[in-house]
Amino acid sequence: MAEKWRTEKKRPTIKVLPWPAIPTPTVEEVYAGVDEKRKEYSLWVESAVRQQFNADKPESLDGIRVLDCTANMNIGHWCSSHFSELGAEVIMVEPPGGDPTRQLTPFGRQEYMFEAKNGEKCGARFLAEARNKFSVTLNLETEEGRALLKKIIPQVDILIENAPPGHYDKLGIGYRQLSEINPRLVYLWVGQRGQWGPLKDDPGNLDPTAQCSMGFVHGTGAPVAFGGTPTRSGWWLCDQVGGTFAAIGAMAALYAREKFLGHGQFVECTGAEAVIRIIDYNWGWNGMDGSVRPRYGNW
């Protein structure tokens, strides 16, 4: 009996029709008998989910210009993608030869890269985070490049950089110098472990470094009783969470500039501090009584 139940073909309870089941109704047919006020409101709501109407709508950050001067780290590009998605004009400032993340591809396999009409290959990750953005080449290690940057800074609302701590200050293009040229500039530094703490000059500036620095890898993996060891996130957790928090901070600075300050400010966000915010109360427990939460894996 059980075997018969498994093999017997079940009949549908409703009549299955080929797609489309019926011709698409016209607007007049859908709203026949509906008063004009309700019809107008319903069509407005419907327009919010129809892609063909999106390009005609005003965007939240329309008129805002962002310079993304970050390179070789996903945290900055992830951050600037939030601005481009909200309508800002985002310009990626790449070093000569292009951002190294252009060459980032799974397992280093060239066959996983995309090829442009000119034969140049590019990794999918860079293409994903370069969407809705412009790109220019500017060598900020030269006097000429820095002079060009200073020339366009009066037209910039947000500048994002991820150079080693204090490097832009040494070049004369840090927040202190650029804010004199454009007091309304919001200057955003992103990285993994910050610019002033005791770990700022230690080796390592990529996502796994931040995951190790703030304790995330201690909690992942199987519990110690099961022979587990620390395990980092398979995706760029600190880059993406840190980039999102950085975008929130910069937009808060924009709001403050327009609402009551009248000038920009310096904003810093790191992958380590951003993920601290989302790993339960591990740091709070340690601060209260010195306890260290045991490894909890993916429970």
Image (cartoon, rainbow, N blue to C red):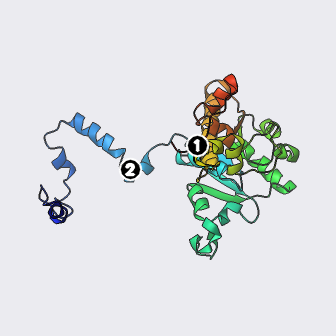
Q: Which mark is residue 288?
A: none
Quarter that holds the N terminus: bottom left
| Residue 187 lies in quadrant | top right
Residue 138 place in picture, x, y as percent: 76, 58
User: 292 and 150: which one is in front?
Assistant: 292
Task: Identify the residue at horizontal 61%, vertical 34% (top origin).
Answer: 277
Q: Which SS class for mark 1?
A: loop
Question: How far apart in space, not on screen, are marks 2 and 1 (Cα)?
Answer: 20 Å
Q: Amino acid at mark 1?
A: Gly
Q: Is residue 160 left or right of residue 248?
A: right
Residue 185 place in picture, x, y as percent: 71, 37
For the residues bearing labels 2 and 1, Cβ distance under 8 angstroms: no
Residue occupied by mark 1: 63
Can I make out residue 3 in this image? yes
Q: Amino acid at mark 2?
A: Phe
User: 77 and 111: which one is in front?
Assistant: 111
Task: Identify the residue at horizontal 70%, vertical 45% (top origin).
Answer: 212
Residue occupied by mark 2: 53
